[in-house]
Image (spheres, rainbow, N blue to C red):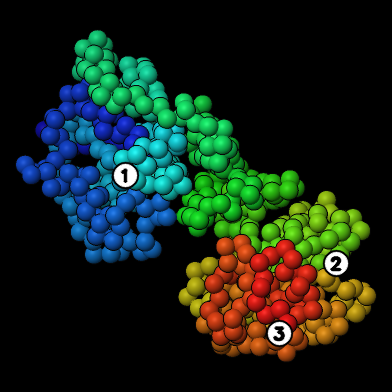
Amino acid sequence: MIMARQEKNIILVVGPPKSGIKLLKSGLNFLCTANAAGETTSDDGKNDPGLINDRLLRALGLSSYPAEGLPAGWQNTKAAGQAKQEIKNYLSETPAGSVPLILGDSLLAWFMPLWQAVFEELEIEPKMIHLTRHPWEVARALHKDEGLDLDRGHLTWLACYRNAVDAGLKHRSLLVVYEQLMEEPRLLFQRIGDELALSFNDGPGNSYSLQLGYAIQAEKRVFYADHMTAGEKELYSVFYRLYNTVAADQGQVGSLEIARILRSKLKSLLRFDLYPAYLAAMEQFYSLAADHHEGGMLKSRTFWGASINLIPREHLSAALYAFELIKPDISAFFVDYLKPGWTVFDVGAHLGYFSMLAATLVGGKGTVICFEPAPSTVDLLKENLRAFSQVTLVPQLVWHRDEKDLDFKVFELAHSAFNTAAANSLSIEQEKALDCSITRVQAVSLDAYSFEGDLKPDLVKIDVGGTERQVLEGMTGLLETVRPVVTLEVGHLRGQENEGIFSLESLLIFMQGYDYVALESVGYRLHVRGSVDQEAEGDQLILIPREKLPLVAKKYEVKQGLK
């Protein structure tokens, strides 16, 4: 007689530190009559899952919870390979049966991709409990017990929450909150048993409630959030809005509304030194929202209240969805510098965010000319610009001369930010991976377009992915006579100098020839660059005619180079 293979019954408890993971695990072990040593495979406990995760964290050179995320390529390191083998050995030795093995620690959320790979290899389908706690509770507990500052504590909560949500999409999962564990443990465990189909050998009755009550009493039931000041609530309000949404509807992890709640105003964004970590978490949230969205485009709002269509699974759209803005340095400069009635050229408009912002600032008597050659992006732009009568969309490439038929590289919509006429912006392998195709487009120079329309731009924003020199060479007449301010995306230019792509140094020398001064934003303050060969500290430069520099210096701490 052939016996059916018994599947291993594994429950993962994933959540931020200081959220009651140990308490929830011990309660589940009690109810399921699990072996007290059920989480170790040896007497010395060296392969306990928590110790595996802790050793890996330290092997990666980290000493605390990685709010900024794990190092790039961490899964390919020798340390990760060793940890993966330890996980595999541990899970392989776990007996199959109806009594579940309860796994969980405060690092599990970060290392779930490694555990997930082993689960798939061993054909194990775990169930998951996502335990979360009020962000202020977590941040205060981490501050009190481990000395983490409150900013990092909140970001630790957010990163852990996001990782847990991501892992929960792959498994049968249940979201529960710490407060219910503290206040209604019997009802909470009944719910866990019902929704995860667990068989409790001793129902959540009097004996269990008594023992769990002792454990809860040991936790002292400290609720820091009960004593928050109004200022503290405002400072971290974006986290609390998310948490309150989650706690009120514990079944809808990863829904559009949860992702949407994380959008933050410009003033809230600028205070975070860990903006890259926050943005990375928000990009993942946006990806979740896109996965749950039925239909083509996602809609969001900008920080000034306009509606904008976004591209699913595209990184600039993710930033807009999370924060209601992109490129905060340039956004802030637009707000400070542009005046009603002015004229703005947006070269490489992409989603149209800066065209929309400029149109709002220059008003109905102003003019915005929006240049975008990619056919797929033009369709999106038309929708986003429909409400702005002062914006003219020009579906042409901006070049150093007028052309009727130029090659233009177009990528799939999710990677449309890479669209370019530059010959070598990406490697051949990268272009293939991103589904690059070639289309033929018309090109126009800014000098020719301005002369024909009798236009005198006050500001020209350039974001073209490698053909900056061609754009600048096509506007020498404007640089000599009209003298517009120019903003330039330069993040991709570091160290560049190949066919069709000029280095940042060569562009700055070119602009010096027209007596322009290069400013860059460091910590949201503008500074004059020391020399043309100086490494760029940010991704954006603002090029100012020297005679206009004192006007800019009144609003910014620009002290150098005022001659």
Q: Is residue 357 above or below residue 31?
A: below
Closer to the eye: label 1 or 2: 1
- Density class for disc 1 (Cα within 10 Å; few <14, some 14-19, many ≥20) is few
Q: Position of residue 224 (x, y in %)?
A: 42, 30
Relative to 159, is 283 on the left or the right? right
Residue 12 falls in which quadrant of the image? top left
Q: Amino acid type of disc 3?
A: Met
Measure the C-alpha gap from mark 2 to mark 3: 21 Å
Q: Position of residue 70 (x, y in %)?
A: 37, 57
Residue drawn at point x = 92 percent, y = 78 percent: 452
Residue at the spot of label 2? 343
N-term-proximal mark, 3 vs 1: 1
Find residue 146 and name its label: 1
Relative to 248, is 30 on the left or the right? left
Asked if the residue at tag 3 contacts the one at tag 2, i.e. Cβ–Cβ closer than 8 Å, the answer is no
Determine the secondary structure under disc 1: helix
Q: Amino acid type of disc 2?
A: Thr
